Image (cartoon, coloured by chain):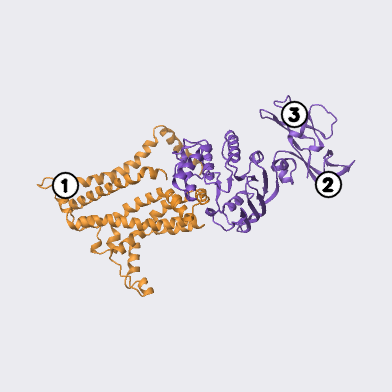
Chain colours: A orange, B purple
């Protein structure tokens, strides 16, 4: 046993020895970058030629179709729902993160409760909400009130905020937890009330976490597919639903690709605008 | 000015401070001195309103402030971590306290300028704290806590973490500024040099209670308890039973007889004697002086302006003596130590 262990170690170390100096950190990074390049960047770039009708008189016909009312409202809805979901989620996540950072000793339990839902498939969680809010569901049973919000905008927002909450709590908790208690103490001794200390010291210092959380939630929420599909009605269709139906139901790859390209450009544009306001690099650099 | 009355603080079952009482007069510089975990920071935080006392009162200008929130106490405080707001410039940091205390905006500008002038940093207003050195940050922290003329200045180990040279320079700073502004100051430290060099009064804390409240001179020369004798300054300790001999009390230490100057021991009780290293004379030959002990040199630490030598006495006690710089002795030499009975601290 010990000899075979020894010989394996010997082989490994001689392999290691022969690789010494030939494999650098740069090589290791190439594996990651190669994977991302092969399965993310190339496929996304590939969408662009797919969206153009080569050899016809109207190569941009798919884009022309995408600029009709139905699809424009889906685009608008995606960004609108993304924005509302982000606002709702950040507010809730800030409360949770604040409580975990300053209000309790049982951080590990709290974190577990935040993380565990991530183990459960989105579809299950959306169906849970669907059943809970349905006219025959436990909410209606217990309260005797039919919430009557299924297949509406509020239902979609509730679902999306719920599902993306953990992604917001983690960065916000991190940045709140990193705040030195002495800074809060100092502001109080300098004459700030609790509220003033929160506004002038705690919130500005947790801004990196808020920005990171906001970016993650907005990007995830704006591109949501399952949430509106399960909890929304025909008037809650978001762009991902349109892309999916063009692709999967109508097999219109060209049109689906055109929608995807437009959406990607709009999203990058929105992030650039956001960047000029917040300077993402600087804010995130402070995390 | 400030009075702490029977202050007691429990954290759960753990007692951090028990029945601590002391007061500070207007303009006085008082130091809470003690090892880490002695309750000095807890006491300071309670005075600032950041920790709620389990029992006891805190009076500021004769008014009971025990339950008042920190922002209503008009206290200035400098932290060991400096606690400068990293997202604000130096000016904004100093202006923060002024704004919170209701100063008008033109008044704030003037006072920020004055404060920066006071700590000799008039050109650093636009910097962020992260761009300053440790000593500069501590000076800004001091300026921030003094800008709105607090009734009392609390300093929580502001010099800990600075290197030796900077520390001594900052001590001079603090002393000068405290004199210039004349603000009542309560300083918390575990560093006896800080305490002895700056304070009017030192409160020595040990394990949540006060061991002695006195001037630095009295604390050093006449410590009230073995803890104070051992914590403040270095010394050699002799212990043993007391016997009586021609009116003076002698403690025998495994056969050695040591004469202490002024004591009121009962014969036969156990006693501790302390001798400061600067009170010990060394000699290579026996001189026949009182309290002469033979030992062997264990270690010589040359400190530049003096040397500190460790001598193992015949009974195993390690004695510490100061000599003139770079003494002409070597490790392993036999050496005679002697000290004046009047310089012996008997407890």
Q: Residues within 10 Å of mark 2 (few under 14, many from 20)?
A: some
Q: Residue B99, how many percent across, how many down?
A: 47, 49
Residue B32 is left or right of residue A95, and the answer is: right
Residues behind callouts 2 and 3 on a single chain:
yes
Q: Nearer the viewer, mark 1 or mark 2?
A: 2
Could you give the CA–CA distance between mark 1 and mark 3, rounded to whole angstroms? Answer: 94 Å
Residue that extends furthest to the top in the rendered view of this protein: B328
Q: Which residue is mark 2?
A: B265
Residue B139 is left or right of residue A214, and the answer is: right
Q: Residues within 10 Å of mark 1 (few under 14, many from 20)?
A: some
Q: Which residue is mark 3?
A: B332
Q: Which residue is mark 1?
A: A52
Image mark 3: chain: B
Element at label 1: loop
Residue A37 is left or right of residue B60, and the answer is: left
Front in this rendered view, residue B159 or B28: B28
Instruction: Give above or below for A48 relative to A20.
Output: below
Q: Residues within 10 Å of mark 3 (few under 14, many from 20)?
A: few
Residue that extends furthest to the left in the rendered view of this protein: A57
Q: Residue B10, how many percent across, how many down?
A: 62, 57
Q: Residue at x 67, y 48 (%)?
A: B205
Could you give the CA–CA distance between mark 2 and mark 3, rounded to whole angstroms? Answer: 36 Å
The answer to whether residue B86 is seen in the rendering is no
Could you give the CA–CA distance between mark 1 and mark 2, rounded to whole angstroms? Answer: 105 Å
Instruction: Give above or below for A196 relative to B129.
Output: below
Q: Nearer the viewer, mark 2 or mark 3?
A: 2
Image mark 1: chain: A
Residue that extends furthest to the right in the rendered view of this protein: B246
Is the C-beta separation of discs 1 and 2 under 8 Å?
no
């Amino acid at each position: 046993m010990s000899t075979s262990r020894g010989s394996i170690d010997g082989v490994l170390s001689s392999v290691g020895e022969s690789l010494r100096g030939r494999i650098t950190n740069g090589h290791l990074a190439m594996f990651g970058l190669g994977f991302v390049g092969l399965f993310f960047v190339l496929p996304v770039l590939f969408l662009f030629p797919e969206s153009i009708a080569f050899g016809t008189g109207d190569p941009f016909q798919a884009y022309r179709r995408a600029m009709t009312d139905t699809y424009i409202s889906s685009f608008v809805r995606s960004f609108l729902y993304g924005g509302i979901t982000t606002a709702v989620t950040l507010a809730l996540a800030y409360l949770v993160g604040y409580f975990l950072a300053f209000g309790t000793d049982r951080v590990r339990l709290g974190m577990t409760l935040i993380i565990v839902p991530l183990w459960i498939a989105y579809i299950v969680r959306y169906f849970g909400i669907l059943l809970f809010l349905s006219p025959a569901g436990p909410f209606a049973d217990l309260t005797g009130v039919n919430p009557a919000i299924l297949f509406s905008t509020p239902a979609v927002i509730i679902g999306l905020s719920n599902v993306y909450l953990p992604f917001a709590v983690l960065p916000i908790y991190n940045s709140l937890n990193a705040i030195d208690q002495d800074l809060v103490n100092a502001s109080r001794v300098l004459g700030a009330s609790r509220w003033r200390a929160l506004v002038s010291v705690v919130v500005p210092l947790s801004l990196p976490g808020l920005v990171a959380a906001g970016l993650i939630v907005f990007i995830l929420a704006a591109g949501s597919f399952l949430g509106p599909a399960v909890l929304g009605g025909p008037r809650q269709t978001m762009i991902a639903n349109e892309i999916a139906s063009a692709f999967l139901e109508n097999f219109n790859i060209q049109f689906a690709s055109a929608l995807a390209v437009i959406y990607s450009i709009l999203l990058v544009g929105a992030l650039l605008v956001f960047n000029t306001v917040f300077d993402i690099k600087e804010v995130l650099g402070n995390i | 000015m400030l009075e702490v009355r029977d202050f007691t603080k429990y954290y759960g079952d753990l007692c951090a401070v028990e029945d601590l009482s002391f007061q500070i007069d207007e303009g006085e510089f008082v130091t809470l001195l003690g090892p880490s975990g002695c309750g000095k920071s807890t006491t300071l935080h309670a005075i600032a309103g950041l920790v709620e006392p389990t029992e006891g009162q805190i009076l500021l200008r004769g008014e009971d402030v025990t339950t008042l929130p920190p922002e209503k106490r008009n206290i200035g405080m400098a932290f060991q971590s400096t606690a400068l707001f990293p997202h604000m410039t130096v000016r904004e940091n100093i202006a923060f306290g002024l704004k919170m205390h209701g100063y008008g905006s033109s008044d704030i500008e003037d006072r920020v300028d004055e404060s920066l002038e006071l700590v000799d940093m008039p050109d650093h207003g636009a910097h962020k704290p992260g761009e300053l050195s440790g000593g500069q940050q501590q000076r800004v922290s001091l300026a921030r806590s003094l800008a709105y003329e607090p009734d009392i200045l609390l300093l929580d180990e502001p010099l800990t973490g600075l290197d030796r040279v900077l520390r001594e320079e900052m001590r001079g700073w603090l002393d000068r500024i405290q004199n210039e502004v004349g603000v009542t100051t309560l300083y918390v430290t575990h560093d006896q040099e800080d305490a002895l060099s700056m304070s009017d009064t030192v409160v020595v804390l040990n394990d949540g209670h006060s061991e002695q409240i006195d001037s630095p001179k009295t604390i050093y020369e006449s410590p009230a308890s073995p803890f104070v004798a051992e914590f403040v300054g270095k010394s050699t300790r002799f212990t043993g039973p007391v016997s009586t001999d021609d009116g003076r009390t002698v403690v025998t230490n495994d056969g050695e007889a040591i004469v202490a100057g002024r004591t009121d021991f009962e014969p036969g009780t156990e006693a501790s004697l302390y001798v400061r290293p600067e009170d010990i004379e060394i000699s290579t030959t026996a001189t026949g002086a009182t309290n002469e002990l033979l030992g062997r040199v264990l270690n010589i630490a040359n400190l530049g302006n003096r040397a500190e030598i460790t001598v193992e006495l015949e009974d195993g006690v390690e004695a510490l003596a100061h000599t003139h710089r770079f003494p002409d002795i070597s490790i392993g030499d036999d050496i005679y130590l002697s000290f004046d009975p009047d310089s012996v601290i008997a407890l």
